[in-house]
Image: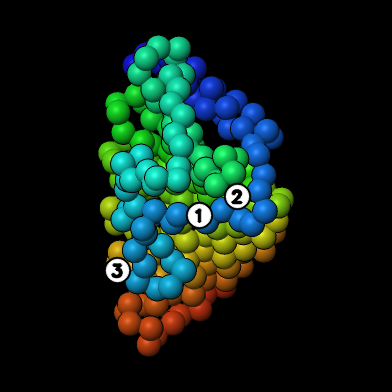
Amino acid sequence: MSQSKFEMTLALVWGLTIGLTLNAPTAEGALKVNPGHAEEIVPGKILVRTIRLQNYLEQIQPDEIVEKRDSLGGENPDIFIVYKKKADGAKTLELQLFDLNRDGKIDLVKHYEKGKLVREERDTDYDGITDIVIEYDGTTGAIKKKSQADKHTNIWTYFVKNEIYRKEVDRNFDGKPDMWVYYRKGKIYRTEIDKNFNGKKIVKIEGPYNPKSE
């Protein structure tokens, strides 16, 4: 896909998201946010690379309706909008699925509750594996938590009013944090490190950790 077409797709994605968020029907009771069947070693710390975004499209439930759209106006859909259908015929926005590079695979999933964005799951390098999950406050829209990973490290970042206050890092990729970084007004003021990855020797450092100093 050409660069210009890719940019057009991204522009349409964000425009569509804004429109659907503002106009999405609301319903009593929050929609259940499917966590993508993410695995956890430590409760609450998801391993994002275990989420398969394509599963959302392949596992549509009988009470769900899918609307398909082609961002380029053709007949090859790259946007899939999933609604939950109620017994009275009403429907509520549940998911938006995007194939950003038009290769037939889902790269971005947006979850909604009461018409508000509450979660995003992204495959940023288009390899079929989730890299980033962002959780939002459904009332304010502020970021609450970001979970991300590459092939070597897991990182969980926590926010208050869109400002980072703590980051937990899994340096040996065992699904458990072994470094904790604390922030104040956007700056690191303390770092704690589990040197031996066994929880028995936690070293506290004022400011950021510099491995070259060891």
Upstream in sequence: badge 3 or badge 1: 1
Q: Which residue is mark 2?
A: 113
As drawn, 111 above or below 185: above
Left or right: residue 155 versus residue 88 is left
Q: Nearer the viewer, residue 47 or 138?
A: 138
As drawn, 198 above or below 23: below
Q: Is residue 53 visible?
A: no
Left or right: residue 184 versus residue 93 is right
Q: Which residue is mark 1?
A: 33
The reply to whether dot 3 and dot 2 touch (C-beta < 8 Å) is no
Question: Which SS class for mark 3?
Answer: loop
Left or right: residue 68 versus residue 55 is right
Q: Residue 47: image x %, image y %?
A: 36, 60
Q: Which residue is mark 3?
A: 174
The amino acid pointed to by label 2 is: Glu
Left or right: residue 10 versus residue 130 is right
Kindly report which numbered mark, 3 or 2, lies closer to the viewer in this rendering: 2
The amino acid pointed to by label 3 is: Asp
The amino acid pointed to by label 1 is: Val
